[in-house]
Amino acid sequence: MAFFRELVSDTNTINEKSFVGVVSFVMMVILFGTDIVTGIMGIKLAVEKWIFDGFMLLTVLCFGISEGSKILQKRVNKK
């Protein structure tokens, strides 16, 4: 509970973009795992393409933006 309280706090130390990226990545891994297990069982898992694309886009953007901001911060600090 304290983690989520700090997450929504104005003075938090948690990088929200990375947190959303990790949650999105975990959801993709769960989706892949479920798809593999249901495939082995012979059941077709119907996942809409836009749902998977949404998780993939969220993951890529969250990690890309946080890495880009780290690079930009290093450049600003050098000047």
Image (spheres, grey):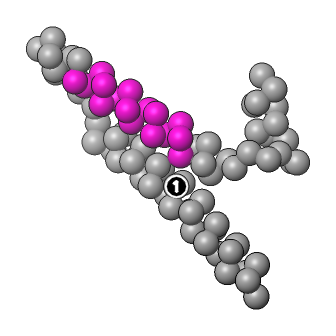
Side (left or right) of 12 relative to 57: right
Q: Quadrant of residue 41?
A: top left
Main SS of residues in magenta: helix
Q: Residue furthest left?
A: 42
**Residue at 73% of width from left, 83% of height from top?**
78
- In the rendering, at what x and y percent does residue 38 appear? 21, 17
Residue farthest along the right direction in this orientation? 11
Q: Which residues are magenta?
A: 21-36
Q: Quadrant of the C terminus?
A: bottom right
Q: Is residue 58 above or below residue 34?
A: below
Any magenta on residue 22?
Answer: yes
Q: Residues within 10 Å of mark 1 (few under 14, many from 20)?
A: some
Residue 52 quadrant: top left
x, y percent for residue 76 = 73, 81
> As displayed, is residue 38 above or below residue 31?
above
Is the N terminus in the top left, top right, bottom left or bottom right quadrant?
Answer: top right
Residue 44 magenta = no
| Image height of 4 relative to 19, above or below | above
Residue at 53% of width from left, 41% of height from top? Answer: 22
The residue that disc 1 covers is 63
Q: Residue at x 37, y 32 (%)?
A: 29
Horizontal side, residue 56 vs residue 66: left or right: left
Mark 1: amino acid: Phe
The residue located at (75%, 31%) in the rendering is 4
Whether residue 37 sits left or right of residue 13 in the image: it is: left
In the rendered image, the residue lying farthest to the front is 78
